[in-house]
Image (cartoon, rainbow, N blue to C red):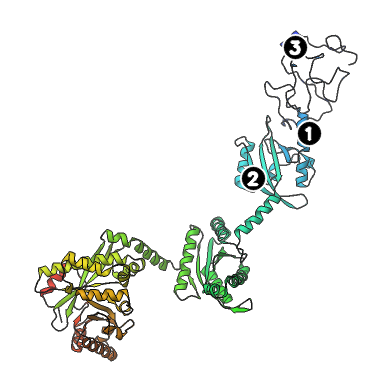
């Protein structure tokens, strides 16, 4: 149309509504489309916006950037100004129909010039439009990305969890998905990108954005490498080793193509501390580096992981192991490699290693258990003599676990009074009269039943529980001996109680004995304390003073298992000893049904004569037959103890033996 507007702002030939008519019409008028403008595919959502929401300014969200006036760039004739939806003439107030935000054309410009790689995606996951930054990021023409699958561009299909969450975003069930993916450009180069996909504001489409974080990822990788590797040996450290072991266990559990097993060689260098102490830590570090290189060479053919766990401890992880033989072969190879001398700083150094070997199915195995088993097996290798490998033994481990369970419950068991005393008579070989008894402790364990002393006494000596346990045994035995004395005054019995050397060191044994004798009323002459030969023969200082004070109180001191320890006869003249108890190994040679050993009889006879010359009495242990008892009597042994007379029995059985002579 042409001409000039009329007085009311109408162009010649145009029919516009009056003010009254406009007030009665909707606020948004239909927009005339540009015939040359591109049309979206049928059913496709708007690329850069959605239809305006109810109450939105006219023209908001329109894909072509039209206003309520003439289409931008296509005026049909001269106008009085830009076609912005204003009525002609000066505005005396807010103009009805004026757009309150940027036009969609501005969004299009921002989309195209944005440095952030972006694409508009429909609800089916197809790319509707891509900006130049995305094309540059992926190394391709952005127009070629249109209609491509967004999941393929962003590599969202490989991870099942990511794929599921991506589908939830497309379906509107989740608001946003953010992932870090490793993508490949059209030229083959790889890059790391942070992918975000979320609904576009006021639109039924979604916005996919990609940020190149390759530099950040590279920095993080270098920092992680420093964090997860040992600076001395360049090997993976403990943290990375546990991470890889956890992954290996999970993969072996669900990977049907693998063996489903895992193996571990846990090694410790023998005597490495001496290298640090004598040659310095610099030489020690160089030796560790050389050891790490040899371990790496041993593990390389099988692709096994080698790590330094700390100090001089290393580990070799075997994924998808084929059985114990594979691990044992690896352990042999490692030992052989480490036996070769190392040339460190012009010095030839030799080291050895102890290796614990564990191999088992991955299913049901936890990293904690695997390391505990390996550590236990390494301890066995050192305990067995070092410079060797030892394979994990479930039975041996069960025994260790039982020991640990017993050790941890010893002290509470004393408080709960789970222990009982049996007594074995000491019989005079000349007349068969019961002269005394030895108190032997038993543990009525609620889980394992009645346990003999050899099951728990060594544990009690290790963890210190022997002190309260020994005090309980001493008090109980003295109380029982006092009861026998009151019941049979003409036949007083000496009660013999075993004392561990740790009781002498860790407690005031003299005070304990004095207090218990005063508490029970037992005369000191009816108490005898037994110490092993190895404990007594090394007695100096405090132990020797304690023994002397006990002897001065009138308490008898006996050396148990004499003849199996140091056998330092010079100590017999200086220690306040009153009795020697010959070890049962000498008495075994006295069996009549076997060929007697003349040497045993000669030794026993010499010991008896020596003891008598020193004013000591002699008790023979482990007497099991009348023939043994008779030969020991002829030699001059004073008393005997063993199953021939009686097994250890409860205290009520001893009462009947006091007045009746024992067999023999």
| Residue 177, x across and y down, in percent | 63, 41
> Callout 3: few (<14), some (14-19), or many (20+) C-alpha neighbours within 10 Å?
few
In the image, 341: left or right of 25?
A: left
Tell which circle, 1 or 2, labels the residue nearer the N-terminal end. 1
Q: Nearer the viewer, mark 1 or mark 2?
A: 1
Q: Nearer the viewer, mark 1 or mark 3?
A: 1
Write down the residue under mark 1. 109
Gap between marks 2 and 3, in whole Å? 52 Å
In the image, 56: left or right of 13?
A: left
| Residue 269, x across and y down, in percent | 53, 72
Tell which circle, 2 or 3, labels the residue nearer the N-terminal end. 3
Closest to the observer, 558 or 424: 558
Gap between marks 1 and 2, in whole Å? 27 Å
Q: Name the residue: 67% across, 48% down.
A: 181
Residue 179, label in figure: 2
Element class at badge 1: helix
| Residue 388, x across and y down, in percent | 50, 75
Residue 407 appears anywhere in the view? yes
Gap between marks 1 and 3, in whole Å? 34 Å
Closest to the observer, 640 or 278: 278
Write down the residue under mark 3. 22
| Residue 215, x across and y down, in percent | 71, 51
Element class at badge 2: strand
Q: Quadrant of the C terminus?
A: bottom left
> Callout 1: few (<14), some (14-19), or many (20+) C-alpha neighbours within 10 Å?
few
In the image, 446: left or right of 424?
A: right
> Callout 2: few (<14), some (14-19), or many (20+) C-alpha neighbours within 10 Å?
some
Element class at badge 3: helix
Q: Name the residue: 79% across, 24% down.
A: 66
């Amino acid at each position: 149309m042409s001409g000039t507007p009329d007085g009311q702002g109408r162009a010649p030939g145009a029919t516009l509504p009056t003010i009254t008519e406009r007030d009665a019409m909707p606020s948004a008028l239909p927009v005339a489309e540009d015939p040359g403008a591109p049309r979206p595919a049928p059913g496709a959502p708007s690329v850069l916006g959605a239809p305006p929401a109810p109450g939105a300014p006219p023209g908001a969200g329109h894909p072509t950037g039209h206003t309520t006036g003439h289409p931008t760039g296509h005026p049909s004739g001269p106008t009085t100004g830009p076609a912005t939806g204003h009525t002609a003439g000066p505005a005396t107030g807010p103009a009805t129909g004026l757009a309150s935000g940027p036009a969609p054309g501005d969004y299009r410009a921002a989309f195209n010039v944005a440095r952030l790689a972006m694409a508009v995606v429909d609800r089916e996951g197809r790319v509707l439009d891509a900006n130049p930054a995305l094309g540059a990021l992926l190394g391709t023409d952005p127009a070629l990305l249109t209609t491509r699958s967004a999941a393929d561009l962003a590599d969202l299909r490989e991870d099942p969890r990511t794929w599921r969450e991506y589908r939830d975003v497309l379906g509107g069930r989740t608001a946003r998905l953010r992932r870090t993916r490793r993508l490949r450009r059209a030229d083959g180069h790889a890059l790391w990108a942070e992918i975000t996909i979320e609904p576009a504001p006021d639109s039924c489409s979604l916005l996919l954005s990609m940020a190149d974080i390759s530099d950040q990822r590279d920095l993080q990788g270098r920092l992680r490498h420093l964090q997860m590797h040992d600076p001395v040996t360049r090997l993976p450290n403990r943290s990375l080793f546990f991470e890889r072991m956890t992954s290996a266990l999970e993969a072996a559990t669900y990977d049907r193509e693998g063996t489903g097993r895992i193996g571990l060689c846990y090694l410790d260098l023998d005597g490495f501390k001496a290298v640090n102490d004598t040659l310095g830590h610099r030489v020690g570090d160089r030796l560790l580096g050389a050891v790490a290189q040899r371990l790496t060479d041993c593990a390389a053919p099988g692709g096994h992981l080698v790590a330094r766990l700390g100090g001089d401890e290393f580990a070799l992880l075997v994924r998808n192991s084929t059985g114990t033989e594979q691990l044992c072969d690896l352990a042999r190879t490692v030992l052989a490699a480490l036996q070769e001398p190392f040339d460190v700083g012009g010095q030839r150094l030799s080291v050895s290693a102890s290796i614990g070997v564990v191999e088992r199915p991955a299913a049901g195995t936890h990293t904690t258990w695997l390391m505990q088993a390996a550590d236990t097996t390494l301890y066995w290798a050192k305990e067995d003599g070092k410079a060797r490998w030892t394979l994990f033994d479930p039975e041996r481990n069960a025994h260790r676990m039982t020991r640990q369970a017993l050790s941890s419950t010893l002290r509470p068991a004393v408080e709960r009074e789970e222990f009982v005393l049996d007594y074995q008579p000491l019989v005079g070989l000349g007349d068969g009269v019961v002269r005394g008894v030895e108190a032997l402790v038993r543990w009525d364990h609620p889980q394992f039943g009645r346990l003999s002393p050899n099951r728990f006494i060594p544990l009690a000596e290790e963890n210190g529980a022997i002190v309260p346990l020994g005090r309980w045994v001493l008090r109980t035995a003295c109380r029982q001996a006092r009861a026998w004395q009151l019941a049979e005054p003409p036949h007083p019995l000496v009660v013999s109680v075993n004392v561990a050397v740790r009781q002498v060191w860790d407690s005031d044994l003299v005070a304990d004995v004095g207090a218990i004798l005063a508490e029970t009323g037992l005369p000191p002459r009816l108490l005898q304390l037994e110490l092993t030969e190895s404990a007594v023969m090394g007695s100096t200082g405090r132990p020797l003073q304690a023994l002397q004070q006990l002897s001065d109180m009138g308490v008898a001191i006996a050396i148990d298992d004499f003849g199996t320890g140091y056998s330092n006869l010079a100590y017999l003249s200086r220690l306040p000893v009153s009795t020697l108890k010959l070890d049962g190994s000498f008495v075994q040679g006295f069996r009549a049904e076997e060929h007697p050993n003349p040497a045993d009889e000669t030794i026993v006879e010499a010991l008896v004569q020596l003891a008598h010359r020193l004013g000591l009495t002699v008790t023979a242990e482990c007497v099991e037959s009348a023939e043994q008892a008779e030969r020991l009597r002829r030699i001059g042994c004073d008393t005997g103890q063993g199953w021939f007379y009686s097994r250890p029995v409860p205290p009520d059985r001893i009462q009947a033996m006091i007045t009746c002579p024992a067999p023999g």
